[in-house]
């Protein structure tokens, strides 16, 4: 007699029923923990037990998770590499401004005619900050 037929066992919806020696035994599916009758979702992102790169975002899915590299990085989520917008020419620095790559981003800047004055522009903003270099 198969005691794992639908309606004949008390396994949780996120468990697998195994017919062993005429008895039903319940095992929680991957990504869940418990005794098979009660299964609880394991949130690997919240627990920090995922394998996502430190420059990636972990997103939970039912019984699993996915990793995606953050903006400014490329890769599969487990391995992420900084995108050098300055070398690739994908930055949005205005003409006459220099580009400096930063981790996951870039900065636009201009050296003024005076060696003691440097203007650093914020990315994506109209904010300019003048700094006197003494």
Image: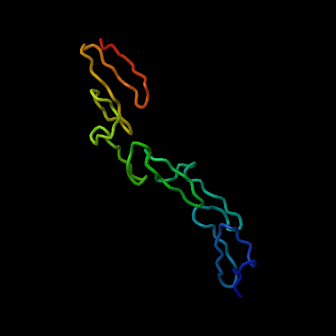
As drawn, which residue projects farthest toward the bottom? 1
> In this view, which residue lies farthest toward the top?
134
- In which quadrant of the rendered view does residue 127 lie? top left
Q: Residue furthest front?
A: 95
| Quarter the N terminus occupies | bottom right
Q: Position of residue 36 (x, y in %)?
A: 67, 68
Relative horizontal placement of residue 26, taking residue 61 as reference (left or right): right
Residue at 38% in and 39% down:
104
Q: Position of residue 56 (x, y in %)?
A: 45, 47
Left or right side of 9 for 28? left
Placement of 119 over or under 81, stated as above or below: above
Q: Nearer the viewer, residue 69 or 42?
A: 69
Q: Nearer the viewer, residue 132 or 31?
A: 132
Check the image and report above or below for 114 versus 49.
above
Q: Quadrant of residue 15?
A: bottom right
The mark tally for this picture is 0
């Amino acid at each position: 007699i198969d005691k794992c037929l639908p309606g004949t066992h008390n396994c949780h919806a996120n468990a697998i029923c195994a017919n062993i020696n005429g008895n039903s035994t319940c095992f929680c599916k991957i990504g869940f923990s418990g005794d098979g009758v009660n299964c609880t979702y394991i949130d690997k992102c919240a627990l920090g037990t995922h394998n996502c790169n430190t420059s990636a975002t972990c997103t939970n899915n039912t019984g699993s998770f996915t990793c995606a590299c953050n903006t400014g990085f490329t890769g599969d989520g487990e391995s992420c590499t900084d995108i050098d917008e300055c070398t690739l020419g994908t930055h949005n620095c205005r003409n006459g401004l220099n580009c400096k790559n930063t981790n996951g981003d870039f900065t636009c800047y201009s050296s003024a005619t005076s060696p003691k004055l440097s203007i650093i522009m914020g990315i994506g903003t109209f904010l300019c900050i003048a700094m006197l270099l003494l």
